[in-house]
RNA sequence: GCCUUUGUAGCUCAGGGGUAGAGCACUUCCUUGGUAAGGAAGAGGUCAGGGGUUCAAAUCCCCUCAAAGGCUCCA
């Protein structure tokens, strides 16, 4: 029948509807409740307005707040509502783009001379909700390019005109709600009435089209919800996340600090932080010995010529810490921004045979990079940091195998430290602009294919990003999120066909001819600084026992038991357990509280009873009293917990 | 580097044109207390730094430095 179409629903059922049926009509045919919650519909894989007529057989999925796409449609529509509110409050405002993001949305606007600040937030929120209550309907209209240009010329919005330049005539649509009309592909929720709660989160500057030569617009970040309660829950989650911020915990737990006198982005590791970091280094050192790495050590500076050879000077020289000059001769040295040139020279220190390969040089190398001041961020982005760096020099036929071994090592480090939620980003060349990369197309293709195959073979959750490759080669990065959901790169593996060429590295093959080795850069942690930052946020400062700066606190009930407490502590130290005795003239309740607050895993309480029996009373952080036991039993218990983690990586 | 915001005691923060306040931490004393804060007293600040306006600036203005949230960048 010509006027009937077949709609396939996600459960596989097929229903017949009149031609021109909308997602909303379908929802209504199922239940009124569903119809009230439908935000949009997926029609043959594309998200459509729920009111848009469907003219032919299709697969349809109805979207609600519970679907990611439903949420992003909701937030995109909210961006239009924000724009409408802004236009009502600040006439003449011009609009850039206003997309939905992972949580919420933003709109880039040009408010002329008005500085959008905290005082404006409430006004705009109220206006948004006022407009939402009138249930303005979102309507879609196709418009010719000429008419669209005329509209925005009349309105004087140069940003929309700029956007229109790149759009194809005949595919341009406008969306309107209330008094606001925007250039938009859609789709949108049925009407603004779905939006019941709105919160402006912050404002930031953002260059038009992300280009720093363009004008800076005001980016207004906001979030909306279909229920007031959900907004409250969201704000609560944000508050909780802030408590895990590594900058806050780092200060509270006395792990690291910064000093203006030392300089921006140059972290100072306090004793407890240094202890934590040292544990991590030792952990990886042991794993690397088993994986066949050879430790090397290189200086913090290197001749400028070294970086001219490597190509880094040409690429980054102007944007780096400037060369250090010696007093009498015309010598120049650079603070090393990376370890690889030094390691290349170690490779060159003697002739290499094909039988020697692969060789793997590992170093916890501290490097210095002049990061832009606005980019510095706690320990995650600093100007001086230590990479758990290593360079593998191998034959071309060994690249893929070595690459996979490194993936194993990274996975094993992440697993031992409890990072289960990470993604792997494969960074390849920009598909169009290839001038910014050094090396031949042939080498790049080989490296890119090797990475993709290895990631696949290891079953990584991979995302491919074009244009994100380093200038010298493609890479595989392991990305982890911080407490606020920001993504950071931790582990990295990079294939490099370029440096061996520039340093003229070679090995003798079985035919007695010279060949060029391939280099793989890799760092499972990435940098100790960033890794510790993410570790703090993921554990909220509750480190596993083997990493905890203080593993235990011995708490005497009163000074009468000082000697017994010291005796116990000595026994623990002999077993390599770390901690302190709380000798302060305080009540036991106070000592317990302070140990809990500083997140010390075990408290050993000793008083009259323990001294008489030769025992300790154990209290575990967050769990409470475990009762008393002989010291030997506690030591066994603690060691068992330590080994539980360490055994994982010994396999 | 750019935009917005912020900078008061070791920490968390209040105040605000008339020469500085709280809680915690710290020191001393009292207390010798059994599983998340015992009591008292004391010490501690060129109110980030510099300049300006003013009879008077921590407070208002300008510059610098640092931090926060973004943008750009990231070997």
Image: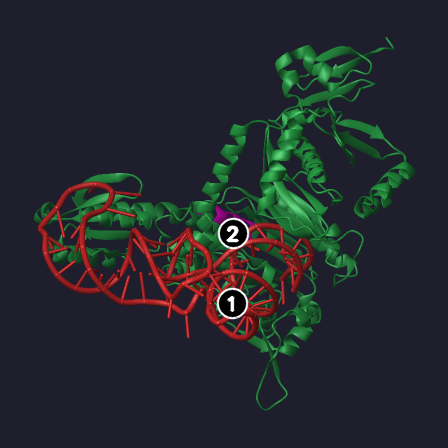
Chain colours: A green, B red
Q: Is residue A25 above or below residue A529?
A: above
Foreground residue among A211 and A309: A211
3D distance between C-alphas at marks 2 and 1: 21 Å
According to the picture, the residue beneath numbered tag 1 turns out to be A366
A401 sits left or right of A233 in the view: right
Instruction: Locate residue A415, reporting x and y percent.
Output: 47, 45
User: Does any portion of residue A513 appear in the rendered image?
Assistant: no
Above or below A572: residue A349? below
Residue found farthest to the right = A146
* Left or right relative to A501: residue A639: left
The reply to whether residue A567 is visible in this rendering is yes
Left or right of residue A617, residue A315 in this image:
right
Q: Quadrant of residue A310?
A: bottom right
Residue for point 83% across, 18% down: A55
**Residue depicted at 31% across the width and 41% down the height:** A622
For the residues labelled 2 and 1, say whether their Cβ atoms are less than 8 Å apart.
Answer: no
Q: Position of residue A251 (x, y in %)?
A: 41, 56
* Chain part drawn in magenta: A405-416
2 or 1: mark nearer the eye:
1
Quick check: is A222 in the magenta stretch? no
Q: How would you classify the magenta stretch by its main secondary structure?
A: helix
């Amino acid at each position: 029948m010509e006027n009937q179409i077949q709609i396939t629903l996600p459960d596989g059922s097929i229903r017949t509807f009149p031609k021109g049926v909308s997602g909303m009509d379908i929802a209504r045919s199922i239940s009124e409740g569903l119809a009230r919650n439908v935000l949009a519909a997926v029609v043959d894989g594309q998200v459509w307005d729920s009111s848009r007529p469907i003219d032919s057989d299709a697969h349809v999925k109805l979207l609600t707040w519970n679907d990611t796409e439903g949420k992003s449609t909701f937030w995109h529509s909210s961006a239009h509502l924000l724009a409408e509110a802004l236009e009502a409050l600040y006439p003449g405002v011009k609009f850039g783009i206003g997309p939905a993001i992972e949580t919420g949305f933003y709109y880039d606007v040009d408010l002329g001379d008005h500085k959008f600040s905290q005082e404006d937030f409430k006004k705009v929120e109220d206006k948004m909700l006022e407009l939402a209550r009138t249930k303005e309907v979102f309507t879609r209209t196709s418009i010719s390019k000429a008419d669209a240009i005329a509209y925005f010329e009349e309105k004087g919005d140069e940003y929309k005109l700029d956007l229109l330049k790149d759009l194809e005539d005949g595919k341009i649509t406008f969306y309107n709600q209330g008094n606001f009309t925007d250039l938009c592909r859609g789709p949108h929720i049925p009407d603004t009435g779905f939006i019941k709660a709105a919160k402006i989160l912050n404002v930031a500057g953002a260059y038009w089209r992300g280009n720093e030569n363009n004008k800076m617009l005001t980016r207004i970040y906001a979030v909306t919800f279909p229920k007031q309660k959900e907004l409250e829950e969201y704000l609560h989650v944000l508050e909780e996340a802030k408590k895990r911020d590594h900058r806050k915990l780092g200060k509270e737990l006395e792990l690291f600090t910064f000093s203006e006198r030392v300089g921006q982005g140059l972290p100072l590791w306090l004793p407890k932080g240094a202890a934590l970091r040292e544990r991590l280094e030792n952990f990886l050192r042991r794993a690397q010995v088993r994986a066949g790495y050879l430790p090397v050590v290189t200086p913090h500076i290197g001749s400028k010529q070294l970086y001219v050879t490597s190509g880094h000077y040409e690429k980054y020289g102007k944007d780096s810490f400037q060369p250090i000059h010696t007093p009498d001769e015309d010598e120049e040295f650079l603070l090393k921004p990376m370890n690889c040139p030094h390691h290349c020279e170690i490779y060159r220190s003697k002739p290499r045979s094909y039988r020697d390969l692969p060789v793997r040089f590992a170093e916890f190398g501290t490097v210095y990079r002049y990061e832009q001041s606005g980019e510095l961020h706690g320990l995650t982005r600093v100007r001086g940091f230590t990479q758990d760096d290593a360079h593998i020099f191998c034959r071309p036929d060994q690249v893929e195998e070595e690459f996979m071994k490194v993936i194993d090592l990274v996975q094993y480090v992440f697993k031992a430290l409890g990072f289960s939620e990470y993604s792997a980003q494969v960074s390849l060349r920009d598909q169009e602009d290839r001038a910014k990369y050094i090396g031949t197309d042939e080498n790049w293709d080989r490296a890119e294919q090797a990475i993709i195959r290895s990631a696949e073979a290891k079953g990584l959750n991979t995302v491919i990003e074009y244009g994100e490759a380093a200038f010298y080669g493609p890479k595989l990065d392991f990305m982890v999120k911080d407490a606020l959901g920001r993504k950071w790169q931790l582990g990295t593996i990079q294939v490099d066909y370029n440096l061996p060429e520039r340093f003229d590295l070679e090995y003798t093959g079985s035919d007695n001819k010279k060949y060029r080795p391939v280099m793989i850069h890799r760092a499972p942690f990435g940098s100790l600084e960033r890794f510790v930052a993410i570790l703090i946020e993921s554990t909220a400062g509750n480190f596993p026992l083997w990493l905890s700066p203080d593993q235990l606190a011995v708490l005497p009930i009163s000074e009468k038991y000082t000697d017994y407490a010291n005796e116990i502590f000595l026994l623990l130290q002999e077993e390599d357990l770390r901690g302190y005795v709380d000798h302060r003239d305080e009540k036991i309740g106070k000592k317990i509280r302070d140990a809990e607050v500083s997140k010390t895993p075990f408290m050993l309480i000793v008083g009259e009873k323990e001294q008489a029996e030769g025992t300790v009373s154990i209290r575990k952080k967050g769990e409470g009293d475990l009762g008393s036991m002989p010291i030997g039993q506690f030591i066994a218990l603690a060691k068992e917990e330590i080994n539980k983690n360490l055994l994982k990586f010994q396999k």
